Image (cartoon, rainbow, N blue to C red):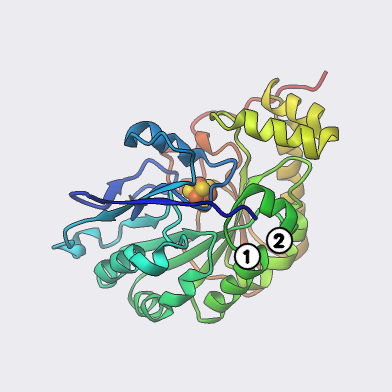
Amino acid sequence: MEQRQIKVNRIETKSVMTKSNAPLGGYAVNPYVGCPHACKYCYASFMKRFTGHTEEWGTFMDVKEWPEIKNPGKYAGQKVIIGTVTDGYNQLEEGYGRTRKILEELKDSGADILICTKSDLVLRDMDLLLKINKKNMLTVSWSINTLDESFKNDMDSAVSIERRLAAMKQVYDAGIRTVCFISPVFPGITDIEAIIDRAKDQCDLIWLENLNLRGGFKKTIMDYIAEKYPKLIPLYDEIYSKKNRSYFEALENKAEDIARKYGCRFVDNETPYERVPQGHPTIVDYFYHEEVRGTANSGKRNKKKVSVKVT
Ligand code: SF4
C-alpha cells in the first residue's frame, strides 16, 4: 500500500452543509477537501479544479473550520451524507476531529445521517453513533469492491478490507444500520457474490454501483488493466469505449438471483429505511447511477436504459 506525504492547510468556510444532488438528496457534508485514500478511480478528484489545487490527488488536504451550526433542528428529517467527496474518517481525522465535530453538532438535529467511509476510525466515535442512533436514523456504509487485499492495495490507501468488514460487524452488532457498498464494481474483477456472501450477516443494505470511467482517471484505470489484467482489455473496451451495457445487465440479473438465493429484496434505485432480519440485506441496484440522480428513493430512473448488442 502506497504511503504519501500529505500537505495540510486549514481553511475557513461559512458552512459545512451543502445541498446535495446525489441520488439520496439532502445535504452533503465534507469536513475536508481532498482525500488521502487516493483511490485510483476517485470521481471526487474533479474537486481539484474548483479548489485551486494542482497537487496530485491524495497528496493534499484542506481541513475545514466552520462556525458552529446554530439551529441544527432545521435539518430534522433531512438526509445528511457525510463523506461524499472525501472520507471523513481519513487518517488525519484522528488528529483534527472534524467529522466528530459535525456529529456532535448534529447529534440532536433529527437528521437522517449517513456516513460513507473506507475506514474503521468510525469506531472511535461509537459513543456518539449510539447516541444519534437512539434518536434519529443513522446508517454507516463501507465501500468494499473486492476481497482481494492486493487489488485493494493497488486501488487505494485506505485500511484493509478485513478491517472494514470487522468495523461493519461491530457497528451492526451495536444495533446501527450498516451498508456494504459494492463500489465501484470492476468488470471481471469484482466478485459481487463472494462479497455479498461475506457481508450479508452484518449489513442491512447492499448497494451496487458500476465503475464509471468518464473522468480523467480513465487512462489510469485502463493502463492498470492492461498491465495487471490484460485479458480484460476487450471487455473494458466494449463497456467503456463502445458503451455496451450487456455485462452490467447480466450482473443485474445475477444480483437478482443472489437476492433470491438468500431471501433478500432486490430493488432498483430505492433505499428502504428499515432494518432487516439478519442475513437478508436489501440489495439495491445503483448501476448507471447517473440515471437515478434527482430521483431520490423513488424506484424510478430518469430515462430508460439503452441496451447495445455485442457484435
Ligand atoms: S475514499 Fe472516496 S473520496 Fe476518498 S479517494 Fe477514495 S473514492 Fe475518493
Q: Position of residue 33 (x, y in %)?
A: 37, 47
Specify whether 153 is left or right of 276: right
Element type at mark 2 = helix
Which numbered disc, 2 or 1, marks the residue that appears first in the sequence?
2
Please tell me how crowded label 1 is: few (under 14), some (14-19), or many (20+) other residues with Cα within 10 Å: many
Residue that badge 1 annotates? 281
Label disc, if present, on residue 196 of the rendered structure: 2
Residue 13 in sight: yes
Determine the image quadrant of residue 144: bottom right
Q: Amino acid at mark 2?
A: Ile
Question: Measured along the vertical axis of the image, is residue 97 above or below residue 27?
Answer: below
Callouts 2 and 1 close, C-beta under 8 Å: yes
Q: Position of residue 281 (x, y in %)?
A: 62, 65
Specify whether 33 is left or right of 165: left
Please tell me how crowded label 2 is: few (under 14), some (14-19), or many (20+) other residues with Cα within 10 Å: many
Q: Count all numbered tags in the image, as a single digit.
A: 2
Q: Nearer the viewer, residue 74 or 186?
A: 186
Residue 137 in sight: no
Determine the image quadrant of residue 246: top right
